Image (spheres, rainbow, N blue to C red):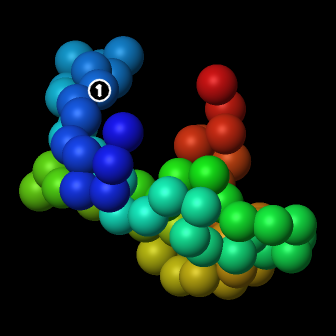
């Protein structure tokens, strides 16, 4: 796999998202332990999900509803 490689993934709700790898061993993780293996972004348009139900960034990423949702399995 190289940077700029694109791939798609079908979600459980039937939607398909397309991603592009934008970095390999490039970004520093928050814990400071080496480099993140892959950095990618979605190239699918029309996706919207707020960090919190009240559409604020209160509590930051660590305490956000979006992070909990993404890590729920």
The residue lying at 57 percent from left, 43 percent from top is 70
Q: Vertical placement of 17 versus 22: above or below?
A: above
Residue 64 location, x and y as percent?
67, 64
For the C terminus, the quadrant is: top right
For the N terminus, the quadrant is: top left
Label 1: few (<14), some or many (≥20) within 10 Å? Answer: few
Residue 62 location, x and y as percent?
77, 67
* Of the pair 51 and 8, the residue shown nearer to us: 8
Q: Vertical placement of 25 versus 8: above or below?
A: below
The residue lying at 67 percent from left, 39 percent from top is 71
Residue 30 placement, left or right of 36: right
Residue 19 location, x and y as percent?
27, 46
**What kind of element bears circle 1?**
strand
Residue 38 location, x and y as percent?
53, 53
Query: Circle 1 is placed at which residue position?
Result: 9
* Of the pair 3 and 10, the residue shown nearer to us: 3
Q: Is residue 47 visible?
A: no
Q: Vertical placement of 67 versus 61: above or below?
A: above
């Amino acid at each position: 796999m190289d940077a700029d490689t694109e791939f798609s993934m079908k979600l459980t709700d039937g939607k398909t998202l397309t991603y592009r790898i934008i970095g390999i061993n490039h970004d520093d993780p928050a814990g400071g332990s080496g480099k993140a293996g892959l950095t990618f972004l979605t190239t699918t348009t029309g996706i919207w999900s707020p960090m919190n139900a009240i559409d604020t960034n209160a509590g930051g990423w660590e305490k956000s509803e979006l992070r909990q949702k993404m890590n729920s399995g």
